[in-house]
């Protein structure tokens, strides 16, 4: 049976999520304080066998769902549980489309069988940090400011998140939203955080991608940086 997640499901969701994705219990508890309402569970005889969450997004004026944290227990894989969860979401007429980013390349074929099409891919780069651009300055942005900057940068051809979901992402990764400026003019925007000695640039909006990412990494005190250029990976318009 597919059900919206409730408080009584939390412990089983935490156990399943932790086993599948390796996140710490305290982090998952923090996430669920914000996103429990977006979760669905596949429950049989009081046991949760699979989970799926759907976050609200828009694209070209259409209302859609961003599918996240899809997983089933290893002992229950191959039983069509993921399919059941996905079909439940696809049957919800409030969504004009669904979008997701597979955890790894090997899952593209899995989701294609469910009717998904590849529409764009993440561009990932990893570089060693060099001397920073001295003419640049950096300034933190609020989720609302970043939402406005992101929407203006991409126009309509991008999956759009509201400020509430951007705040969740900020808390989830303990990151910040930035604008990089040259002569008082923005030359790039980014969502980034520090992981040990590496700057993880989760989203980068700039013409001079490497220069801007390198500057952010320097400002965060890192010697390496990994950056992503786009956000959406697969989509299906219903």
Image (spheres, rainbow, N blue to C red):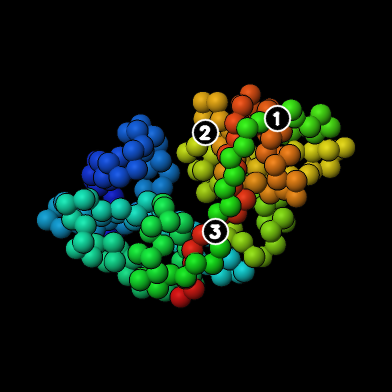
**Residue 183 appears in the figure:** yes
Q: Are marks 1 and 3 in contact (CB under 8 Å)?
A: no
List x then y, in percent, for residue 224: 60, 31
The 10 Å Cα crowd at callout 1, few under 14, some 14 to 19, many 20 or more, is few
Residue at the limit of the structure toward the right, as seen here: 183
Coordinates of residue 149 in the picture (x, y in percent): 71, 50
Q: Residue at x 54, y 67 (%)?
A: 119
Q: Which residue is mark 3?
A: 121
Q: Is residue 156 above or below residue 197?
A: below
| Closer-to-camera residue (51/218) | 218
Residue at x 16% of width, y 52% of height: 75
Q: Earlier in the sequence, mark 2 or mark 1?
A: 1
Tell me, yes or no, if residue 163 can be seen here: no
Cα separation, mark 1 vs mark 3, equals 27 Å
In the image, residue 218 sits, relative to residue 51, either above or below, namely above
Q: Quadrant of residue 199?
A: top right
Q: Which residue is mark 1?
A: 130
């Amino acid at each position: 049976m597919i059900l919206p997640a409730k408080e009584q499901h939390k412990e089983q969701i935490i156990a399943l999520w932790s086993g599948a994705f390796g996140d710490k219990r305290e982090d998952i508890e923090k996430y669920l304080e914000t996103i429990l309402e977006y979760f669905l569970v596949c429950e049989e005889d009081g046991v949760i066998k699979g989970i799926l969450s759907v976050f609200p997004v828009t694209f070209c004026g259409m209302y859609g769902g961003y599918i996240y944290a899809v997983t089933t227990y290893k002992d229950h894989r191959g039983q069509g549980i993921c399919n059941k969860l996905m079909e439940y979401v696809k049957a919800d007429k409030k969504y004009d489309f669904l979008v997701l980013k597979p955890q790894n390349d090997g899952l593209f074929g899995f989701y294609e069988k469910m009717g998904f099409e590849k529409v764009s891919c993440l561009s990932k780069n990893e570089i060693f940090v060099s001397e920073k651009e001295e003419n640049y300055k950096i300034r933190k942005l609020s989720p609302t400011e970043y939402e406005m900057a992101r929407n203006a940068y991409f126009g309509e051809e991008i999956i759009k998140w509201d400020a509430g979901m951007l705040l969740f992402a900020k808390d989830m990764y303990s990151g910040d939203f930035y604008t990089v400026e040259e002569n008082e003019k923005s030359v790039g925007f980014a969502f980034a955080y520090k992981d040990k000695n590496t700057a993880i640039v989760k989203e980068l909006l700039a013409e001079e991608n490497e220069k801007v990412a390198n500057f952010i990494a320097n400002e965060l005190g890192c010697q390496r940086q990994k950056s992503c250029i786009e956000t959406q990976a697969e989509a299906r318009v219903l």
